[in-house]
Image (tube, grey):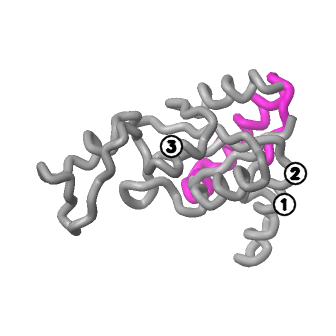
Amino acid sequence: MKIYFAGPDVFYPGYETLVQTINALGSQYGFEPLCPGVGGLTTPESIFARNLQLIEKADGLIANLNPFRGQEPDSGTVFEVGYARALGKWVIGYLTDRRDLLAKLEPDPHQLLPDGSMVEDFGFPLNLMLALGVERLASSLTEAINLARQKI
């Protein structure tokens, strides 16, 4: 089984160590990890094309949906989740803070944020399209890998 690992992790120091850990887990549990940012591609076009190829090659996707540069998951990761779903791939997300959006964002009593936008009250920790767009939502990478292992 091939699993694509989506997330903003590539933008953090120590990404190479994370990839090594994922590769070791793949060897241990019998899956082939497909990680973005590996292979020395430098142009936006080549990175985009390679990530799409990896998703197409994968059986499923594990996505880091933790907030990145704000209150929402990384937009590139969200795109990759949608692309994988459109291809009929399974998607498992992980998110450390599983509280619902109202608890996390603490809007005024009318569910409005300071910018005037409304927070939906569906009890999900993410926007409904993403919360329902993943097959399962884990609380950590380790838990997500364990859920994926059930598919092997």
Furthest toward the left, the residue is: 109
The residue sitting at 55% across, 37% down in the picture is: 94
Of tags 3 and 1, the one toward the viewer is 3
Q: Which mark is residue 6?
A: none
Q: Are marks 2 and 3 in contact (CB under 8 Å)?
A: no
Which residue is disc 1 drawn over? 53
Give residue 87's position: percent from left, percent from top.
78, 53
Which residue is disc 3 drawn over? 131
Give residue 41's position: percent from left, percent from top.
78, 69
Q: Are marks 2 and 1 in contact (CB under 8 Å)?
A: yes
Q: Are marks 3 and 1 in contact (CB under 8 Å)?
A: no
Q: Residues within 10 Å of mark 1 (few under 14, many from 20)?
A: few
Can you tell which quarter of the image residue 92 is in?
A: top right
From this view, report whether residue 30 is shown above or below residue 52.
Answer: above
Part of the protein shown in magenta:
9-34
Give residue 137's position: percent from left, percent from top.
55, 34
Amino acid type shown at disc 1:
Gln
133 part of magenta stretch: no
Of tags 2 and 3, the one toward the viewer is 3
Instruction: Kindly report the distance in space between the C-alpha atoms of the residues bearing marks 3 and 1.
Output: 25 Å
Give residue 96's position: percent from left, percent from top.
45, 35
Q: Main secondary structure of the magenta part?
A: helix
**Image quadrant where one finds the C terminus:** top right
**Image quadrant where one finds the N terminus:** top right
Disc 3 is placed on an element classified as helix
Can you tell which quarter of the image residue 80 is in?
A: bottom right
17 part of magenta stretch: yes
Which residue is disc 2 drawn over? 57
Amino acid type shown at disc 3:
Ala
